[in-house]
Image (cartoon, rainbow, N blue to C red):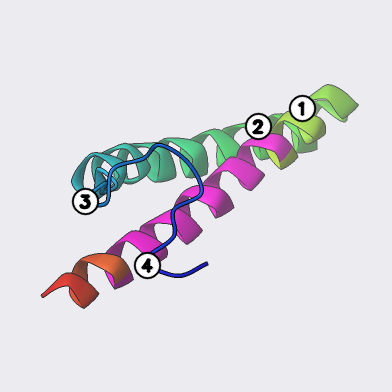
Amino acid sequence: MTQDRRSGTEPRTARSALRLRLLLSGIALPLAVIATIYFGIRAARTGETVWTVEAVIVGAVAVIALIDLVVIVRRLRARR
C-alpha cells in the first residue's frame, strides 16, 4: 500500500487520537495490575478456579495496555 493509493474513504490526513489512547491505557494499566493482584490473592486463598481465570484475563488486559503504551510513546516521539 502506497501513500498515493488509499484503500477506502479515509482522508489523507487521518490521524489516531494518540493522546486519548495514552490517557486510556495509562488508566487501564494500573487498574488491571491491581485487579490481577487482587484476583491472584483470592485464587491463592480460596483455591477456586474462577479467581484464577479472572486473574489471567485481567493480566492479559494489563499486558495489552502496556504494549499499547509502548507503541503510543514511540509514535509520539516519531512525530517530533
- In the rendered structure, which segment of residues is drawn in magenta? 57-74
Mark 1 lies on residue: 51
**SS for callout 4:** loop
Q: Position of residue 75 (x, y in %)?
A: 29, 67
> For residue 3, which numbered disc appears in the image?
4
Q: Mark 1 touching mark 2, by CB under 8 A? A: yes
- The answer for how far apart the CA atoms under marks 2 and 3 are is 43 Å
> For residue 13, which numbered disc appears in the image?
3
- First in sequence: mark 4 vs mark 2: 4
Q: Mark 4 touching mark 2, by CB under 8 A? A: no
- First in sequence: mark 1 vs mark 2: 2
- First in sequence: mark 3 vs mark 4: 4
Residue 76 in sight in this render: yes
**SS for callout 3:** loop
Q: Mark 1 touching mark 4, by CB under 8 A? A: no
- First in sequence: mark 1 vs mark 3: 3
Magenta region, mostly helix, strand or loop?
helix
